[in-house]
């Protein structure tokens, strides 16, 4: 995936090799290497970060709880509240766990990546990751989790929002987040209708060129313990990356050999 971009960047790095040779540095004697990992065993899943927007109440039996549910969190209600919020009218359960930090994407990691001796100052690691994303509606139980004495029908809406990925090396984020806006998912009738199966599956692509400058001693480690991709959901939808539709690729390009 995205091979054209990869080959273009590698070509640019080879130009750097030629320039180094012209400036009395030893040109690289090793060929570039490609390491790829594909998440093809299971689907990767990331739970919703927010409650949905509760609206269109029918035959509502509890006016106070209805008002609380349909009011936005910023105004003191439960709509679009962080998913770990406990409803003040419910059984004190939560809709899920709040994940304020990036968490690993299943299978998208490479351990103990070796950098050849003699190239730890000059090598370029062109890292690219591709993650297919699907946003799904989620069905909630209003009674008793959110409202102990509420009966009726309510619609849950799932607005558009961002899902982010980031490159982590040895547990530390390197480079900026890469974000993709997921369009709103189909509304769900909590009383009768099961969540739809989605239907929007965009592909998020991130890239970063890892060099010696990214490390405190300005030297690539002889072995990089862990290179991984993490993600973060900021929507009311459940996010799924299907198996076989996400990968991480590292193109290691030796530039000049240190004597």
Image (cartoon, grey):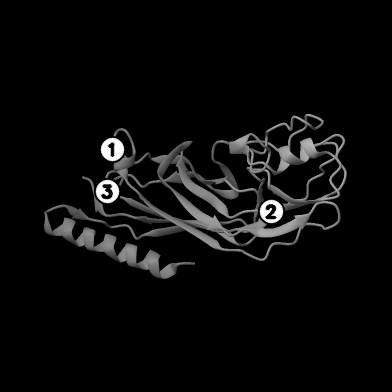
Q: Residue at x 39, y 64 (%)?
A: 6
Residue at disc 2, secondary structure: strand
- Report the side of 107 relative to 177 (left or right): right
Q: CA distance from mark 2 to mark 3?
A: 51 Å
Residue at disc 1, secondary structure: loop
- Report the side of 154 relative to 251 (left or right): right
Q: Residue at x 53, y 56 (%)?
A: 181
Residue 208 position within the rendered picture, expressed as x and y whole percent measured from the top left = 39, 52
Q: Which residue is mark 1?
A: 218
In the picture as drawn, the residue positioned furthest to the bottom comes out as 4
Nearer the N terminus, badge 1 or badge 2? 2
Q: State the mark number for residue 122.
A: 3
Task: Tell me the quarter of the picture where residue 28 sits.
Answer: bottom left
- Report the side of 207 relative to 103 (left or right): left
- Vertically, is 229 above or below 74? below
Q: Residue at x 85, y 34 (%)?
A: 148
Q: Residue at x 58, y 37 (%)?
A: 74
Q: Nearer the viewer, mark 3 or mark 1?
A: 1
Q: Which residue is mark 2?
A: 157
Nearer the N terminus, badge 2 or badge 3? 3
70 or 112, which is in the foreground? 70
Q: CA distance from mark 3 to mark 1?
A: 10 Å
28 or 134, which is in the foreground? 134
Q: Nearer the viewer, mark 1 or mark 2?
A: 2
């Amino acid at each position: 995936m995205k091979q054209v971009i990869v080959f273009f960047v590698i070509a640019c790095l080879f130009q750097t090799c030629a320039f180094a040779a012209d400036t009395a540095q030893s040109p690289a004697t090793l060929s570039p290497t490609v390491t790829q990992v594909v998440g093809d065993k299971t689907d990767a899943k990331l739970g919703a970060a927010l409650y949905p927007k509760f609206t269109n109440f029918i035959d509502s039996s509890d006016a106070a709880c209805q008002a609380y549910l349909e009011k936005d969190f910023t105004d003191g209600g439960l709509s679009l509240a962080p998913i770990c919020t406990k409803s003040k009218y419910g059984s004190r359960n939560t809709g899920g766990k709040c994940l304020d930090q990036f968490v690993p994407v299943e299978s998208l990691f490479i351990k103990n990546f070796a950098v050849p001796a003699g190239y730890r100052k000059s090598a370029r690691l062109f890292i690219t990751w591709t993650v297919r994303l699907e946003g799904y509606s989620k069905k909630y139980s209003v009674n008793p989790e959110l409202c102990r004495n509420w009966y009726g029908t309510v619609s849950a809406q799932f607005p558009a929002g961002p899902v982010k990925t980031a490159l982590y090396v040895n547990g530390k984020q390197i480079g900026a987040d890469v974000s993709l806006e997921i369009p709103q998912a189909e509304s769900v009738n909590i009383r009768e209708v099961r969540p739809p199966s989605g239907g929007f599956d965009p592909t998020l692509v991130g890239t970063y060129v890892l060099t010696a400058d990214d490390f405190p001693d300005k030297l690539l480690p002889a072995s990089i313990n862990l290179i991984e991709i993490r993600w973060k959901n900021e929507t009311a939808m459940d996010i799924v990356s299907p198996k076989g539709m996400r990968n991480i690729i590292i193109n290691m390009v030796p530039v000049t050999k240190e004597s």
